[in-house]
Amino acid sequence: MTCLGRHRALSEIGKLHTNCKQVLNYMTEHSELLSGNLPPFGPLIIYGLPRTGSTLLQNLLACDPDCRSPLITDMCIDIVPPISRSNSVEHEKRMAARISYFGQIALFEAEAKHIFASHPYFPIDEDYYILRQASFLPFFTMITSDQVSDDGTWLLKELNKDYVYDYHELFLRMLNSVDAPRSHWLLKTPVHSFKLDTILQHYPNAAIVMTHRRLDEVLPSSCSLSWSLGSIHLDKRDAASRNTIKKQTLQFIDKAIECTVEFRTRLDRIHDEKRKNLFDVAYNDLMEQPIATVRRIYDYFGLRWSDEFEGAMQVWLCNNPQGKQGRHSYSLKECDLMIEDIEARYADYITLFQCSPSSDIASASSH
């Protein structure tokens, strides 16, 4: 890591620790909130491999006025006390503080543009920001590792942290106490792939949507995004740093696929009742028929559809065309993998979800 990169990372980790302490102290002082009820349905949780369209899907689903998805200003800056969505003045104040904070750690405009082209910024964001506060930090572990282990030990240590979902539920209850959705909460992050059983222990009524995309697109796009995020901490001229990020990104994907395949095949094998709470979405379907895809999700889970919801999605799509925040370019060469390698390495996943690089991904279904 560069000196500036180390400063950025330590500054961010310090802020996460401060946020966690503030939330724990707030909930201790307001212990009655622990017995408050979350909505009976959900949360509706989107997960899947990175780069599979989950950000688009989250933003579309968040157009439902009956649901609530956490804002970045709920999860990152001055998060205590929690505030309602209608408190626009305070949300704008928090956003200004976040922009100022990034200026202090020298996130230069050129770097920001490259990152946003890879992963566009929106007011709502991943609940990974909640998990990070409880020290679930696979990304920081990735960029600070001096050596890369072949067994992915760096990631396994991060995954041995079930307690982060204790904090996650605590945080969600805190937000719910001031502005509960009429229907359900909406959450999204790829890291939920690692802890699906733990999630269902905390949220037994969760409805889970898994996004899928061809792996010859997922893998290079993920490696490119990881480098965009990681390079602001590292020496861009150092080829070893890029190779480290690439190898650890693939280890991250490997583990996510392993956990997903194990979870799904186990539920299918034992005919687990939780299987009915899962729904699959294909990337191609989402790109070609976004509103129809959302409609299928709502029909499957029996959620209320409204003209207001559909109209809001149409407006969002019109205002946010693909590539608005920049074009993300990548190639399979960045992963040092051939299509044949992918089909052999991820055969179980490809067979289970019918997403071979050599054919179109299967249409959305509930399997």
Image: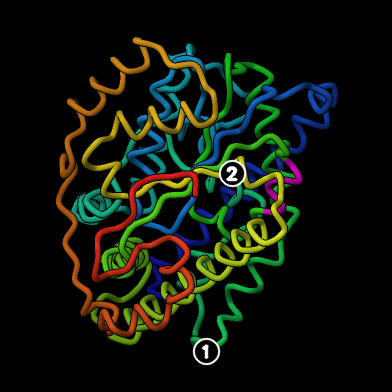
Question: Relative to residue 111, is residue 349 drawn left or right?
Answer: right
**Secondary structure under badge 2?**
helix
Q: Magenta stretch mostly in which secondary structure?
A: helix
Which is more toward the observer, 243 or 307? 307
**191 relative to 249, above or below:** above
- Can you identify the residue that label 2 sits on? 130
Is residue 63 at least partly visible in the picture? yes
Q: Residue at x 45, y 22 (%)?
A: 91
Per the model, the C-alpha gap separating discs 2 and 1 is 29 Å
- Can you identify the residue that label 1 sits on? 150
Which stretch appears magenta? 197-202
Q: Amino acid at mark 1?
A: Asp
**Secondary structure under badge 1?**
loop
Question: Relative to residue 189, is residue 156 drawn left or right?
Answer: right
Which is more toward the observer, 348 or 312? 348
Q: Residue at x 41, y 36 (%)?
A: 58
N-terminal of the pair, mark 2 or mark 1, is 2
Q: How many other residues sit within 10 Å of disc 2, few (<14), some (14-19) or many (≥20)? A: many
**87 relative to 238, above or below:** above
Q: Reply yes or no: does residue 289 show up in magenta.
A: no
Residue 194 spot, x, y in % from top left: 60, 61
Question: Relative to residue 186, is residue 308 drawn left or right?
Answer: left
Residue 367 spot, x, y in % from top left: 49, 49
